Amino acid sequence: MDFLRRIGVKIRSAAQHFMMGRYGTDKLNMAILSVGLLVSVATWFVFLPVLDMILTALSYGLMLWAIFRALSRNTYKRYLENRRYLRFLERLKDKEHKHFACPRCHQPVRVPRGKGKIAITCPKCKEKFIRKT
Ligand SMILES: [Zn+2]
């Protein structure tokens, strides 16, 4: 039994060594994997060969993308992707505000919903633009 435990420790330390400096997983990766899994489940109910092929390729693609992200050494870029994804989720949940990007500097601006047409002043560059809320 001691032999098995020693092998276990070795495998774990090898895995740790392999993941050193690599990004690992995050919420975006979990989402990519879930969608990939959903798509591959969806292929069970698809009987059109072309569609089945496309969905299978898509699910493999998504899973490969998640693996690529987890093993990536460019952790900063992966971190930014995850942050963008989290911000996107937040906006989906936010029913009280509407989000616009400033037409001049692309600064994201958040305004209350349901106020009709309003003039918005960009907090960064002071550009004024009119949007329906
Ligand atoms: Zn601006």
Image (spheres, grey):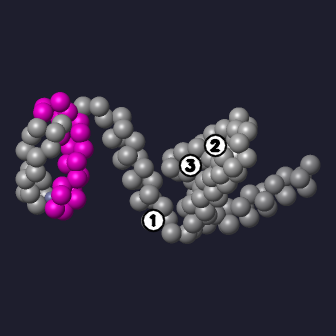
Disc 2 and disc 1 in contact, CB within 8 angstroms: no
User: Residue at image x 12%, y 33%?
Assistant: 116
The CA distance from mark 3 to mark 1 is 16 Å
| Residue 24 drawn above or below residue 114 | below
For the residue pair 26 and 99, the one nearer the viewer reads as 99
Q: Helix or strand or loop: what does disc 3 sit on? A: helix
Name the residue tied to disc 1. Answer: 77
SS of the residue at dot 1? helix
Residue 113 magenta-highlighted: yes
Find disc 2 in the rendering and name its residue: 39
Residue 131 seen = yes
Disc 1 marks a residue whose amino acid type is Lys
Give the mark nearer the N terminus: 2 vs 1: 2
Q: Which of 87 and 18 is in front in this view?
A: 87
Identity of the amino acid at label 3? Answer: Ile
On the image, the x and y values in percent for residue 4 come to 89, 53
**Is 100 one of the magenta-colored residues?**
yes
